[in-house]
Image (cartoon, grey):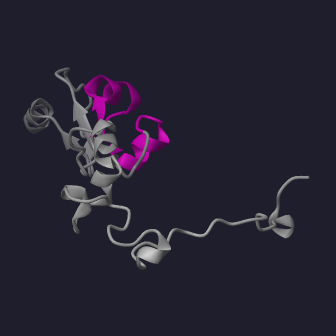
Protein backbone atom coordinates (compact mmCIF):
# COMPACT_ATOMS: atom_id res chain seq x y z
CA UNK A 1 0.00 0.00 0.00
CA UNK A 2 1.53 3.36 -0.97
CA UNK A 3 2.14 5.93 1.74
CA UNK A 4 -0.12 8.98 1.69
CA UNK A 5 -1.19 11.56 4.24
CA UNK A 6 -4.17 9.54 5.48
CA UNK A 7 -2.24 6.35 6.34
CA UNK A 8 0.96 7.67 7.97
CA UNK A 9 1.62 6.11 11.38
CA UNK A 10 4.13 6.86 14.11
CA UNK A 11 6.98 4.36 14.38
CA UNK A 12 6.45 1.70 17.04
CA UNK A 13 9.29 2.97 19.25
CA UNK A 14 10.90 6.42 19.01
CA UNK A 15 14.34 6.90 20.54
CA UNK A 16 14.48 9.98 22.78
CA UNK A 17 17.50 12.29 22.47
CA UNK A 18 20.37 12.03 24.91
CA UNK A 19 20.04 14.64 27.70
CA UNK A 20 23.57 15.77 28.46
CA UNK A 21 24.92 17.51 31.58
CA UNK A 22 22.19 16.49 34.02
CA UNK A 23 24.41 15.13 36.80
CA UNK A 24 26.56 12.03 37.25
CA UNK A 25 23.60 9.76 37.97
CA UNK A 26 22.34 10.31 34.41
CA UNK A 27 25.52 8.75 33.01
CA UNK A 28 26.36 11.83 30.96
CA UNK A 29 27.35 14.26 33.71
CA UNK A 30 30.74 15.83 34.59
CA UNK A 31 32.33 16.03 31.11
CA UNK A 32 29.01 15.71 29.21
CA UNK A 33 30.32 13.43 26.48
CA UNK A 34 33.18 15.76 25.53
CA UNK A 35 36.06 13.84 27.08
CA UNK A 36 38.50 15.52 29.42
CA UNK A 37 40.83 18.27 28.17
CA UNK A 38 41.52 19.77 24.78
CA UNK A 39 40.03 22.19 22.29
CA UNK A 40 36.94 20.06 21.68
CA UNK A 41 36.09 19.91 25.38
CA UNK A 42 35.88 23.70 25.68
CA UNK A 43 32.90 25.91 24.96
CA UNK A 44 32.78 27.76 21.65
CA UNK A 45 34.07 25.01 19.37
CA UNK A 46 31.89 24.92 16.28
CA UNK A 47 30.09 21.69 15.58
CA UNK A 48 31.47 21.77 12.05
CA UNK A 49 34.92 21.25 13.50
CA UNK A 50 33.90 18.69 16.10
CA UNK A 51 31.96 16.51 13.69
CA UNK A 52 34.55 16.62 10.91
CA UNK A 53 32.32 18.78 8.71
CA UNK A 54 35.01 21.35 8.02
CA UNK A 55 37.00 18.86 5.98
CA UNK A 56 33.85 18.00 4.03
CA UNK A 57 33.10 21.66 3.37
CA UNK A 58 36.62 22.17 2.04
CA UNK A 59 36.23 19.17 -0.30
CA UNK A 60 33.02 20.43 -1.91
CA UNK A 61 33.76 22.11 -5.26
CA UNK A 62 32.86 25.79 -5.26
CA UNK A 63 31.66 27.84 -8.19
CA UNK A 64 34.56 30.10 -9.12
CA UNK A 65 34.70 33.33 -10.99
CA UNK A 66 32.31 36.20 -11.46
CA UNK A 67 29.01 36.52 -13.26
CA UNK A 68 27.95 39.98 -14.32
CA UNK A 69 24.45 41.26 -13.63
CA UNK A 70 24.49 43.24 -16.86
CA UNK A 71 23.02 41.34 -19.80
CA UNK A 72 25.20 40.66 -22.84
CA UNK A 73 24.39 42.33 -26.15
CA UNK A 74 22.56 40.39 -28.84
CA UNK A 75 24.83 40.78 -31.84
CA UNK A 76 23.63 41.35 -35.41
CA UNK A 77 25.92 41.81 -38.38
CA UNK A 78 25.65 44.54 -41.02
CA UNK A 79 25.11 41.82 -43.65
CA UNK A 80 21.92 40.72 -41.89
CA UNK A 81 20.65 44.32 -41.88
CA UNK A 82 21.42 44.64 -45.63
CA UNK A 83 19.57 41.42 -46.48
CA UNK A 84 16.48 41.87 -44.27
CA UNK A 85 15.63 45.57 -44.60
CA UNK A 86 15.00 48.19 -47.30
CA UNK A 87 15.88 51.88 -47.65
CA UNK A 88 14.26 54.31 -45.14
CA UNK A 89 13.17 51.52 -42.74
CA UNK A 90 13.15 51.98 -38.97
CA UNK A 91 15.04 49.32 -37.06
CA UNK A 92 14.24 48.64 -33.41
CA UNK A 93 14.32 45.55 -31.14
CA UNK A 94 10.60 44.79 -31.71
CA UNK A 95 10.99 44.62 -35.49
CA UNK A 96 14.16 42.53 -35.18
CA UNK A 97 12.32 40.13 -32.88
CA UNK A 98 9.37 39.84 -35.27
CA UNK A 99 11.79 38.91 -38.07
CA UNK A 100 13.40 36.30 -35.74
CA UNK A 101 16.80 38.00 -35.89
CA UNK A 102 17.08 38.26 -32.08
CA UNK A 103 15.80 36.03 -29.29
CA UNK A 104 14.30 38.57 -26.90
CA UNK A 105 13.35 42.24 -26.79
CA UNK A 106 14.43 42.62 -23.15
CA UNK A 107 18.19 42.30 -23.75
CA UNK A 108 20.21 45.01 -25.55
CA UNK A 109 20.97 44.77 -29.28
CA UNK A 110 24.22 45.79 -30.97
CA UNK A 111 25.01 45.90 -34.68
CA UNK A 112 28.59 44.90 -35.49
CA UNK A 113 30.58 44.36 -38.63
CA UNK A 114 33.14 45.91 -40.91
CA UNK A 115 30.95 45.38 -43.98
CA UNK A 116 29.54 48.31 -45.91
CA UNK A 117 25.96 49.34 -45.13
CA UNK A 118 24.27 49.45 -48.55
CA UNK A 119 20.93 50.87 -47.41
CA UNK A 120 20.18 54.58 -47.08
CA UNK A 121 17.93 56.50 -44.69
CA UNK A 122 17.75 53.84 -41.97
CA UNK A 123 16.52 54.94 -38.57
CA UNK A 124 17.84 53.06 -35.53
CA UNK A 125 15.90 53.11 -32.25
CA UNK A 126 17.21 51.64 -28.97
CA UNK A 127 20.07 49.90 -30.75
CA UNK A 128 23.80 50.14 -30.06
CA UNK A 129 26.23 50.05 -32.96
CA UNK A 130 29.95 49.75 -33.62
CA UNK A 131 32.15 52.76 -34.31
CA UNK A 132 32.64 51.78 -37.97
CA UNK A 133 28.88 51.68 -38.53
CA UNK A 134 28.44 55.09 -36.88
CA UNK A 135 31.07 56.52 -39.23
CA UNK A 136 29.23 55.07 -42.23
CA UNK A 137 25.92 56.61 -41.10
CA UNK A 138 27.56 60.03 -40.56
CA UNK A 139 29.04 59.94 -44.07
CA UNK A 140 25.65 59.19 -45.71
Residue that extends furthest to the front in the rendered view of this protein: 25
Residue that extends furthest to the right in the rendered view of this protein: 1
Q: Nearer the viewer, residue 101 or 41?
A: 41
Q: Per the image, is 77 magenta?
A: yes
Q: Is residue 54 left or right of residue 21?
A: left
* Residue under the point 86% across and 69% down: 6
Instruction: Residue 132 in the image: state x and y as whole percent.
Output: 10, 30
Q: Is residue 95 above or below residue 77?
A: below
- Screen quadrant of the C terminus: top left
Q: Nearer the viewer, residue 9 or 21?
A: 21
Number of numbered discs overlaid on the protein picture: 0
Asked if residue 85 shows in the view, the reply is yes
Q: Is residue 60 above or below residue 41?
A: above
Instruction: Residue 38 in the image: state x and y as whole percent.
Output: 19, 56
Residue that extends furthest to the bottom in the rendered view of this protein: 22
| Figure quadrant of residue 84 | top left
What span is colored magenta in the figure? 73-102
Q: Is residue 69 left or right of residue 14?
A: left
Q: Per the image, is 124 magenta?
A: no
Q: Is residue 6 left or right of residue 14?
A: right
* Residue under the point 25% across and 61% down: 41
Amino acid sequence: MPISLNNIKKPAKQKSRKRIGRGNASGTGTYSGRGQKGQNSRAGVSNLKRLGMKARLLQIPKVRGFKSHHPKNQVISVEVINSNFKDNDTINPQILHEKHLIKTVKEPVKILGKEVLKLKGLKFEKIKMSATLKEQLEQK
